[in-house]
Image (tube, rainbow, N blue to C red):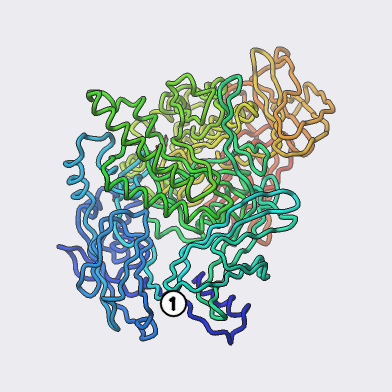
Amino acid sequence: MRKILILLSILIIVGCQQKNDLPIEISLNENWQFKGIDTLSWNSATIPGNIFTDLLVHKIIEDPFIKTNENKVQWISKKDWIYRTTFQLSDEVLNKKNIELNFEGLDTYASIYLNDSLLGKTDNAFRKFTFNIKRLAKKDNHLKIIFKNTDEIEIQKEVINPYKLPEGKRIYSRKAQFQYGWDWGPKLNTSGIWKNISINAWNDYKIENIYVKQNAVTDSAANLIVEIENQYIEKEQLKYDVYLNNKLHSENSNLKIPITIKNPKLWWTHNLGEPYLYDIKVIVKKDDQILDSISTKYGIRTIKLINKKDSIGESFEFELNGKPVYMKGANYIPQNSFQNKVTNTYYEKLLTDVVKSNMNMLRVWGGGIYENDVFYDLCDEKGILVWQDFMFACAMYPGDKSFLENVKTEAEQQVKRLRNHPSIALWCGNNENSEGWKRWGWQADRTEKEKKAIWNDYLAVFDSILPKAVNEFSDTDYWETSPKYGRGNPKYKSEGDAHDWWIWHDAYPFEHLQENVPRFMSEFGFQSFPNFETIKYINQKDAIDLKTDAIKSHQKHVRGFQLIDEYMERDYKIPTNHEDYAYVSQLLQAKGIVMGIEAHRRAKPYNMGTLYWQLNDCWPAISWSSIDYFGNWKALQYKTKKAFENVLISSKIEKDSVKTFIINDTFEKLKGELKLKVIDFYGKELWFDSKEIELLENSSQQFYTFSLNKFDRISTLLITEFNNEKSYFYFSKPKNLKLPKGEIEQQISKIEKGFKITLESDVLQKGVFLYSKAKGHFSDNFFDLLPNENKVIEFKTKATKLDDLQIKTLNNI
Ligand code: BMA
């Protein structure tokens, strides 16, 4: 569709009368059917799609996301499946010199037959495959694809591999690894045509690819090279017209076209400037005939990962347009076990949430998928940087020739596909493979020779093939593995990126995050229960019941429930009813993660980024996510929004003193008055001070310290203010606070996009949680309401009534 629109706009630009010999592109997504090789009869299929959603549409299986249905659908992955379609080709297409059949994604072991001839076999869901069908194509065609189950092929591959590799057989298949089951996701190993299929017919010329390279960028000029990769059968000279924002900018007959943009507008992350994008379009002509065209959005920016030795170790910081930028964000996983369900609306909503929450970086984690184009397009547009893992996670991978060649092609295709996106900040080889090898016991009972061989296979991929692909085909930096050093290594804190799983996996208290600040935190996290609506969906019943088999089957971490309980006991009174428990689990998660985020940000520039685990879910789950499967913000998402503001006031207790810091992520000096006051829970002011301060640009500074000795720590709190920023700080754990009982008065009025809710109380109300059966989004939630404060919340909803608004607070637990 995009291509058709581009072609239309070209025709308008160059005048409709002009002759052309453009390639013809035809979608083959329609008219498909599927059946099992040895089961079921033909039924209609949806492309892009997968076998599970096709079976679901025809009600052959029950929804695997509810109750314990996941168990009932495991047979599907053990079967072979067949998909077929018929299509017609016009004479115009058949007369072209080249006719290609393109598969953007086949999942995974596919044998493709066109008009009963075997066209080829594929073995990588992350690669696109193209076949020349000039010889086989006819007016009436039938296309058939047989998908072998992965089990069978993985067993064959395992038998041939000289040694058994850790973490099961998934490593033999180049497909989304989380589909084999993860500690937050179900085992739903899909099969099918998961991306578009099309025909591309052309005569002598076709563009394959465009690469916009930055030569030099200054305030006065950006020198770019627009490189065209094409297929060209004749050898006559061609003309390349480059359009910049729809105006003809230059004409050239070189495949590498230099262009200069005067006074360029740079691309910035949304929190530091405008993510400005240029439109670059190239039209290829022979004499006056148009042969093909291509266009891309392009943001001019430099992004570098700086690893510089210093007195402590080695820095890990991103420099955007020459400035060090603090990275704030989270780890992103696929939004659904069934990728075809993730429509553009989901991408738009989630990435809008990311911006609203003041995040400027996401890490696309290596156990999922290389995301769809729309994901990166939106990150470009919205000013979000992407740390992009290659799709390898938590395992050691084989190193035979065919595996390595397969990975090489995959890497080259993906790097080329993503290289023009200004959002791409880094390519990273894998998630925790190196840490796993060094720390998780995978070397036990192996001979030296075997260990060496396995590590050499690791190096072949992550120290050779992948960095070569990144260096050869893009300007992006490469990082071998995340984390660089595991938490058993003393360098954890002084060098590279780090994953802090002392919290959660090792059950260390949250406070441990404050003493263990690394140079860049690329993962740390804590689980919570999802929204009530999501719990009800899992159980398919209206009461909130956390003890059902369904809920147990949606908690994939073996010690998950126990760990939530253990941590909750440290900080909160453990509620006896299930609803309150789910609510407090969210406050607990938010408390722990925000404690980490603030410690990391206070340590700037020693630490230059914090990405928590994990932003989203791929099914309704009890997990580390801050936004649940249905898009509901958990407490953590609301707290993150605050903790990631460009200017953050953050206090901590050291011995008996409170130390107050302000972090400034902007590139401006800020002046203002820092106001501090301590009040009791009934609103009585016990102490006040203020001071004029100046914040350096891009800094973290301590501005104030005071002794806690004169305050009763369980019934008072500190309120700090600087310009428009406000922050509350407590001196004791929530379970020890003497929270008063008191009513909250509420007023609700209808506004255009939902409802306005005004709340007030005589006493401090902690952790105020608003909820309703109506679907919608509260502008703020899980907040603390100060005594006599008038708090206005907007509830954005399509519902016309709001007569069931309910409120929970910690005061009442
Ligand atoms: C991290 C991730 C995932 C995992 C998460 C929670 O290390 O990379 O593998 O889901 O921990 O255990």
Picture residue at 59% right of the left edge, 67% below the top = 281
In x, y percent, where is residue 193?
33, 62
- Choose top left, top right, bottom left or bottom right for residue 788: top right
In x, y percent, where is residue 37?
17, 63
Picture residue at 33% right of the left edge, 33% below the top = 558
> What residue type is disc 1 on?
Ile
Q: Is residue 203 above or below residue 740?
A: below
In x, y percent, where is residue 509?
49, 22
Which residue corresponds to mark 1? 24
Front residue of this view, candidates 111 and 741? 111
Local secondary structure at mark 1: strand
Looking at the image, residue 296 sits to the left or right of residue 223; the answer is left
Looking at the image, residue 421 sits to the left or right of residue 563; the answer is right
In x, y percent, where is residue 413?
42, 55
How many callouts does the rendering have? 1
Q: Is residue 431 above or below residue 41?
A: above
Front residue of this view, candidates 92 and 432? 92
Front residue of this view, candidates 467 and 47? 467
Q: Inspect this view and state whether residue 409 appears.
A: yes
As drawn, the residue found furthest toward the front would be 236
- Choose top left, top right, bottom left or bottom right for residue 623: top left
